[in-house]
Image: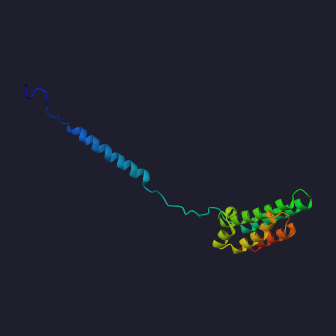
Amino acid sequence: MQDDAGFYAPLHYQQHWLWLGLMLVVLMVVWYLWLLWPTGKKVPVNHRTTVLDLNALQTACLTHIEATLEDVDAGRLPGRAAHQRLSFLVRNFAAAATGLPVTSMTLEELRHHGLDHLATGIATIYPNEFAPVPIQSVRRSAETARQVVLEWN
């Protein structure tokens, strides 16, 4: 029997493969650092680039409230839909004035953000939106909506 017939010593890799592998690892680390490195200034989430013109917002909202009353008086809009529109108009106004997602907030969330006057106005209009028979007239809800808009500061 031959003892050394099937045994071969391990081959040694050439050194340029080691350096090439290390270079690839370093390049990958540099690439990820370059991708994830923060650049420029961070812009705050609530940073507003437009100048808020509260008077224009109030005028537009009050115009829409009056248009809603005219639609009700002309019979083009039922009472429940009018109450819903008034609530939507006031919420849209507040969203534009504050930059908060007011249209999807609950009354508790509105109060939590310091919008107590808005929450009170919406709470006055709410029962009329969902009740089978409105508790108060559309005119009364419109007056509440007007007060919320006019007393906004």
- The quadrant in which residue 109 appears is bottom right
Q: Position of residue 139 (x, y in %)?
A: 87, 68
In the image, 14: left or right of 32?
left
- The quadrant in which residue 63 appears is bottom right
Q: Position of residue 148 (x, y in %)?
A: 76, 72
Q: Quadrant of the N terminus?
A: top left
The residue most toward the right is: 74
In the image, 85: left or right of 34?
right
The structure residue drawn at horizontal position 20% and vertical position 36%, both measured from the top left corner, is 14
Tell me if residue 4 comes above or below residue 95 in the rendering: above
In the image, 86: left or right of 74?
left
- The quadrant in which residue 79 appears is bottom right
The structure residue drawn at horizontal position 66% and vertical position 73%, both measured from the top left corner, is 111
In the image, 129: left or right of 99?
right
Q: Position of residue 140 (x, y in %)?
A: 85, 71
In this view, the residue in front, 25 or 113, is 113
Q: Position of residue 32 (x, y in %)?
A: 40, 50
In this view, the residue in front, 3 or 141, is 3
Q: How many marks?
A: 0
Tell me if residue 115 comes above or below residue 71 in the rendering: below
Tell me if residue 13 comes above or below residue 87 in the rendering: above
The residue most toward the top is: 1
The structure residue drawn at horizontal position 73% and vertical position 64%, both measured from the top left corner, is 91
Q: How is the image coloured?
A: rainbow
Q: Quadrant of the C terminus?
A: bottom right
